[in-house]
Image: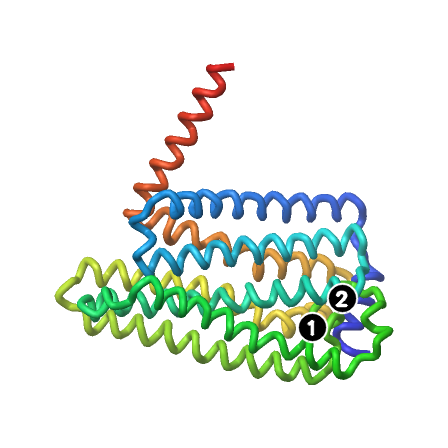
């Protein structure tokens, strides 16, 4: 029996009670709405102020927030479907999984690019102005192209190796069930290792370059180092997605009767928690963004208060 088949068998055998299932879904929905609501406020703040449009740092941050909102929404839909419908058509499942994988793999790449931007701003301030909006948009395009090149072969391999009947069948929606070929698992592991090495090399390189190079701007350098450390922590959380298959396999062997609870914990840690840190880094720590975010929130509260009194 394959790992994916074993996972589905265990989940089916030890499905949650009605109360536990409702509790888990309520927790997931509340957390996702909270994260997306905060991120929506950040997006509105970005859109309403031209000062952010020409700064590569905020453009990359805007892309990260939009990407995370899409990712959270997709994974929450899949989570709820797993309880309400349990099994869905393979083609629909595959479409959801592909989009979720694109956005999931975008996040660490985006964070690495933000670390490089921070490094250039501190260590090469005169060159920083050369990083214009068009180049930043090209970089975002490269991030998506890298994720597409990494993930799309899963679809091509599945189309080439699976019979037509497979695409009309219904499965418990996981990456392993939508794309069951064993070669995909090997490709995934190699890709994750390459991502892990490249992204962490960028994080460590930029951090230590700022640490040892930017001595004349100590205050800015210290803030930049702290920002990159937060990026590193966020990347660390995002990288748990790369260890998730091994973690699920281990938890299945150690706690077979609590496997559904283990999947729930993995989902919160791997999918939700990393996406809740971006608002803290730029929505609260960044002085410029914080100032405009306060204006946006105060204006919104004022408008709501005026509307209430008007009624």
Please, what secondary structure does the residue beneath circle 2 have?
A: helix
Looking at marks 1 and 2 on the same chain, the residue that comes earlier in the sequence is marked by: 2
Query: Residue 299 has which mark?
Result: none
Query: Quarter of the image holding residue 270?
Result: bottom right
Identify which residue, 300 or 220, lies in the foreground: 300
Q: Residue 187: where, in percent of width, then height?
A: 62, 83
Q: In the shown orientation, is residue 102 left or right of residue 22?
A: left
Identify which residue, 93 or 81, lies in the foreground: 93
Mark 2 crowdedness (10 Å alpha carbons): few <14, some 14-19, many ≥20? some
| C-alpha gap between disc 1 and disc 2 | 25 Å
Please say if 198 is above or below 40. below
Residue projecting furthest to the left: 216
Mark 1 crowdedness (10 Å alpha carbons): few <14, some 14-19, many ≥20? some
Identify which residue, 46 or 36, lies in the foreground: 46
Q: In the shown orientation, is residue 298 left or right of residue 83?
A: left
Task: Please tell me which residue is depicted at 67% across the width and 43% down the height of the picture.
Answer: 26
Query: Residue 91 has which mark?
Result: 2
Task: Please tell me which residue is depicted at 40% across the width and 35% down the height of the picture.
Answer: 297
Between circles 1 and 2, the one closer to the viewer is 2
Task: Please tell me which residue is depicted at 22% across the width and 63% down the height of the picture.
Answer: 221
Task: Please tell me which residue is depicted at 23% across the width and 64% down the height of the picture.
Answer: 129
| Quarter of the image where the N terminus is located | bottom right
Image mark count: 2
Q: Mark 1 points at which residue?
A: 249
Please, what secondary structure does the residue beneath circle 1 have?
A: helix
Query: Quarter of the image holding residue 306?
Result: top left
């Amino acid at each position: 029996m394959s790992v994916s088949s074993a996972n589905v068998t265990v989940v089916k055998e030890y499905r949650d009670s009605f109360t536990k299932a409702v509790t888990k879904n309520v927790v997931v929905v509340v957390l996702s709405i909270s994260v997306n609501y905060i991120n929506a406020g950040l997006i509105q703040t970005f859109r309403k102020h031209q000062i952010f449009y020409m700064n590569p740092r905020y453009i990359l941050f805007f892309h990260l927030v939009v990407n995370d909102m899409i990712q959270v929404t997709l994974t929450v839909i899949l989570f709820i479907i797993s309880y309400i419908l349990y099994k869905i058509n393979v083609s629909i499942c595959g479409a959801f999984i592909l989009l979720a994988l694109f956005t999931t793999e975008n996040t660490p790449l985006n964070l690495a690019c933000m670390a490089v931007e921070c490094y250039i701003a501190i260590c090469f301030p005169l060159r920083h102005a050369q990083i214009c909006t068009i180049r930043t948009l090209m970089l975002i395009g490269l991030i998506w192209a890298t994720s597409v090149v990494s993930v799309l072969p899963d679809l091509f391999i599945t189309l080439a190796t699976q019979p037509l009947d497979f695409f009309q069948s219904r499965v418990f929606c996981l990456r392993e069930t939508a794309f069951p070929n064993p070669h995909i698992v090997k490709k995934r592991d190699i890709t994750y290792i390459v991502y892990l090495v490249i992204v962490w090399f960028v994080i460590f390189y930029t951090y230590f370059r700022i640490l040892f190079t930017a001595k004349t701007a100590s205050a800015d350098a210290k803030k930049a180092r702290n920002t990159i450390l937060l990026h590193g922590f966020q990347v660390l959380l995002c990288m748990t997605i790369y260890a998730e298959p091994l973690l699920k396999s281990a938890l299945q062997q150690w706690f077979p009767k609590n496997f559904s609870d283990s999947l729930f914990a993995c989902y919160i840690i791997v999918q939700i928690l990393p996406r809740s840190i971006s608002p803290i880094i730029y929505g609260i720590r960044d002085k410029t963004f914080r100032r405009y975010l306060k204006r946006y929130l105060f204006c919104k509260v004022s408008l709501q208060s005026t509307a209430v009194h008007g009624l």
